Image: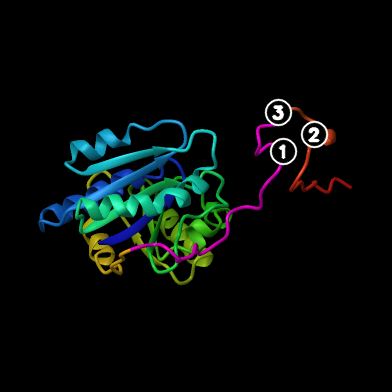
Amino acid sequence: MKLVTFSGPPSSGKTSVIVNVAKSYQQEKKSVGVVKLDCLTTNDNLIFEKAGIKVKVGLSGNLCPDHFFISNIEDCVSWGKINKFNILFSESAGLCNRCSPHIEGVTAVCVIDNLMGINTPQKIGPMLKRADIVVITKYDIVSQAEKEVFAFRVRQANPKAVIIHVNGITGQGAAELGKLLIKAEEIDSLIGMKLRFSMPAALCSYCLGEVRIGKDFQMGNVRKINLK
């Protein structure tokens, strides 16, 4: 089975891109599964099910979503193997722009949209900078100049990535993306493999549920802003 991790800011179009790629695989009789990871709630499972894609949802609740991801992805791979998928997609949102679910040896995709502003690629951390493929969506509702400048900024942030434009509504570009993803390496297990980038430094008192404000209540990893 092949595993591909999809990540990207909320509402960038990850689900639509995955559905359109999956449709191109369904025409080739390839089986696709999706693990959707979110924080509090999601209805994206209904979109996948409507498209005939088997899906499991994981909600991190009050845990860091990317910590939740890496604590569960091995079990997700086992679920995919039991269902004998040809390819399993994991979808997660990099909510803090610092985390990254990308794993060494596993094809990683970052989805980003053209409406976020031309400086956004510089603000997104390893989720974009360590991706193998960067998918740009919503390019059809900006000018050609804006489209080219945005792609250039993505190229500056990640010179090694393959950059591809996909229209989440019409599916244009999805078949081309599918041809890239089907080249992903087969995996049997993730045990012993490594993340491409470390999670944020932890742990502080607020990670443990502290709600009171003030230095007397701040313990662990605390960094102060320089206001001098």
Q: Earlier in the sequence, mark 1 or mark 2?
A: 1
Q: Amino acid at mark 1?
A: Ser
Magenta stretch encompasses residue 16: no
Q: Which residue is mark 1?
A: 205
Q: Which residue is mark 2?
A: 217
Q: Residue at x 50, y 64 (%)?
A: 196
Q: Which residue is mark 3?
A: 211
Report the Cα–Cα distance between label 3 and label 2: 9 Å
- Magenta stretch bounds: 189-210
Q: Earlier in the sequence, mark 3 or mark 1?
A: 1
Occupied quadrant, residue 176: bottom left
Q: Residue at x 29, y 44 (%)?
A: 16
Q: Position of residue 149 (x, y in %)?
A: 47, 59
Q: Are marks 1 and 2 in contact (CB under 8 Å)?
A: yes
Instruction: Point out the residue furthest to the right here.
Output: 228
Q: Amino acid at mark 2?
A: Phe
Magenta stretch: dominant SS?
Answer: loop
Q: Which mark is residue 56?
A: none
Q: Position of residue 191 (x, y in %)?
A: 42, 63
Report the Cα–Cα distance between label 3 and label 1: 9 Å
Instruction: Provide the secondary structure element on which disc 2 rests.
Output: helix
Q: Residue at x 19, y 36 (%)?
A: 50
